Image: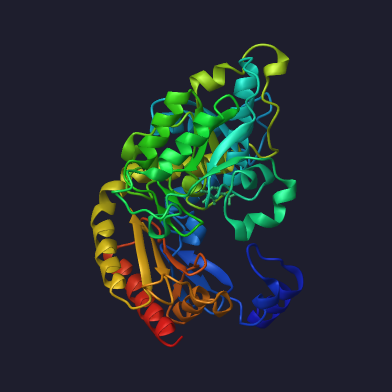
Amino acid sequence: MDYNVLVEKDLRYLWHPFTQMSDYASRPPLIIERGEGIYLIDVHGRRYIDGVSSLWVNIHGHRRPEIDRAIKSQLDRIAHSTMLGIANVPAILLAEKLVEKTPEPLTRVFFSDNGSTAMEIALKMAYQYWVNRGVKGKSRFVSLVNAYHGDTIGAVSVGGIDLFHAVYRPLLFPAYHAPSPYCYRCPLGKAYPSCALACLRELERIVDEHQDEVIGIVSESAVQGAAGMIVMPDGYMRGLREIADKYGVLLILDEVAMGFGRTGRMWACEHEGAWPDIMAISKGITNGYLPLAATLTTEEVYSSFLGDYTKTFYHGHSYTGNPLGCVAALANLEIFEKDRTLEALVPKIRRLSQWLEEFRRLDFVGDVRQKGLVAGIELVSDRETKSPFPREEAVGFQVVYKAREMGVVIRPLGDVMVVMPPLVISVKELDRLMEVIYVCVKEVTERQ
Ligand SMILES: *Cc1c(COP(=O)(O)O)cnc(C)c1O
């Protein structure tokens, strides 16, 4: 179909997520038609490196024959049947695989459709766990400032990004928010490691003070993603587990963004052996093919729901355990083994670090942060004072538009440039991606 016709229909009918629609029309929309490996191809046939993995979901590249085949062959059987009280073949097989692949203590899989619902389910399960055990008064989560757990109201209640969340405050349930482990802008004015993880001690103080009320600690694993790829300092994740153990509360980890190999391990919590009681996964689960998510729990949490009808988990979505999504996820996991995805990451992670050192030398780069094959490059107008660029200049987006002209699709988080290519990217392609971002950052920031 003709580009101009599509643009007209796009502007007439669509409402894009996380997008100020009054700006959207001010430049020609990018309309993707096809994909191939790490490339997106637009309706004009122009190719772009998919530098943010189609919003953090793609792992092994677009149009993987193994996943295409798995979905096509499942289509010849059935596209969907319900999981309410009955089962389907792919959901059973995927649940087994996920239990095998996830941290040892997690033994049960509850499916849903996206990261927000996986977290929503985690929160409701955690709350009801205590109710089912007959423990009274447990009604508050401890979560983190700068947290992002999705956009549904429960997930927003434990979220901590004012720009996204503040407007909904009157609708939210209360939660305790511990300081963000944001070392570059330490909320406690300290420096790692001499701080001895003072932010974690503050979290512990909150749990200690409210221990009878606290259901559990809620956190992203290893990196606060949406807040700007804030990498937690060493020891932080282990500390969360220790505090949860010390006070006998649940640890609920959100691996939606960092799971499936992103940080160099299959699960980000593996780096410090911070095994959760409940874990939410989604984004990478189907290689970006179909919406699917899962909430995994320990046998301890699961078994508290056994017994009479009042203990049932009354939650479920129409598309829960969708067979097409499940076969895509199974094929996705098989590729990890076949391609040795995690081993192959090692040189790419090293190359990304080398590139980030180059960025660190730029005048308007305040901080660079990396965990595995994800990085955040924080742009500032003054390195001494760490002052941000004025918001109306939208420096991050200026870099994005420039990069688009050079064949790279990225999306910033404010003035943090996000690097999050599919794990399958080659070192050479990674070089190209980083070169483009480097040139664009330099050009845009130096002309401000
Ligand atoms: C993206 C994300 C979510 C929400 O997932 P959706 O599929 O977009 O609803 C939750 N938690 C984290 C850490 C995320 O990055």
Asked if 199 appears above or below 320 in the picture, the reply is below
Residue at screen point 62% across, 33% down: 140
Closer to us: 433 or 395: 395
Asked if 124 appears above or below 30 in the picture, the reply is above
Is 110 situated left or right of 354 in this image? right
Residue lying farthest bottom? 447
> Percent x, y for residue 283?
51, 49
Image quadrant in which you'd find residue 265:
top left
> Percent x, y for residue 112?
61, 38
Render colour scheme: rainbow
Closer to us: 44 or 187: 187
Closer to us: 211 or 21: 211
> Percent x, y for residue 119?
58, 40
Residue at screen point 49% across, 47% down: 179
Residue lying farthest top? 307
Asked if 419 appears above or below 123 in the picture, the reply is below
Is 2 situated left or right of 421 in this image? right
Is 69 situated left or right of 340 in this image? right
Asked if 248 appears above or below 264 in the picture, the reply is above
The quarter of the picture where the N terminus appears is: bottom right
Residue at screen point 46% across, 77% down: 399
Residue 106, can we see it?
Answer: no
> Percent x, y for residue 398?
50, 79
